[in-house]
Amino acid sequence: MMMSDMPQDLLEEILSRVPAVSLKRLRSTCKRWNDLLKDERFTEKHFLKAPKQSRILMSDDYRICSLDVDLNVAPPAIEFKGPLGLRDMRQFDTDEIFHCDGLLLCSSKYENRLMIWNPCLGETRWIETTTTDSEDLLSYCSFALGYQNNKSFRSFKILKCWNRVFHIEGFEIYDLSSDSWRVLDDLALNCWILDSGVSLKGNAYWLALGETGSGDSKKLFICGEDNEYYRQIPCAGTTNPVIFSYVPSLFRVQQSGSK
């Protein structure tokens, strides 16, 4: 049976297990396949079933480069693959990059716009930010990318959190599907975002410095963009916590000489 004659459900099942880097090469092969790869329902299915291909990226001088790290040689080798293909990267002085399921949210303190970029597909989207009366030279904005789970696809959203004088002044949500910003009311918090956050299953996680009755304390600040909730969890027993993402695997770590 030729691929062009294959039933739609069987074709989807096969292509949903092909790695994204390989799958993108099929976009120009066949109109039927190209239409399928644009289907949001198939995109969600592919993300759940396809093998994950982790990459190390580095931002430097208006560029985002891909790195290959070889730990099987002594000393370990790092190979720069060169900048990823983004034509107008030099027009955007990126300060922070937030990753969420293959999408990069790039922000800059010198710009009044954001950029969402899929390096695998080479697609970008520019988003104008808003300025409120509460923002001034003492303000610092943090941005996160998350999503709301619908029945068969994800509705991506951007969370804007602006800090001022050691407390969170307010929040805004940008909905990519409606192309609009809106303010989240009554969410002023007595804490300060310390660093770039991470994304897990559509939720944004930040470390924050908060005020308590006995002084300042570190907190884990969680914002769920699915139903737009927030939580604060004290980080007890530590003075300098670090937040990072982790991908579970079955690779074994054995003692020397053991089998």
Image (cartoon, helix red, strand yellow):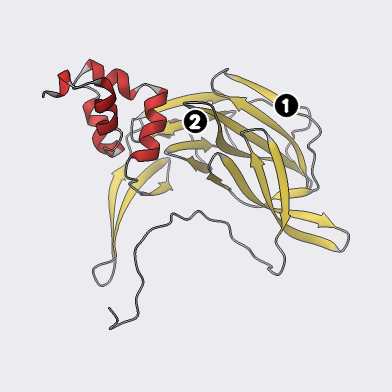
- Disc nearest the viewer among 1 and 2: 1
**From this viewpoint, which residue is outermost toward the right?**
213
Which amino acid type corresponds to the residue marked 1 in the rendered image? Val
> Which residue is located at x 76 percent, y 60 percent?
217
Where is mark 2, residue-wise? Answer: 115
Q: Which sits in the foreground, 131 or 31?
A: 31
Q: Which sits in the foreground, 178 or 141?
A: 178
Q: Quadrant of the N terminus?
A: top left
One can see residue 139 in this view: no
Label 2 crowd (10 A; few <14 / some 14-19 / many >=20): some
Which amino acid type corresponds to the residue marked 2 in the rendered image? Met
Where is mark 1, residue-wise? Answer: 183
Q: Position of residue 85 (x, y in %)?
A: 32, 34
Q: Position of residue 63 (x, y in %)?
A: 39, 41
Q: Quadrant of the C terminus?
A: bottom left
Q: Position of residue 251 (x, y in %)?
A: 34, 63
Label 1 crowd (10 A; few <14 / some 14-19 / many >=20): few
Tell me the CA gap for discs 1 and 2: 20 Å
Tell me the element at label 1.
strand
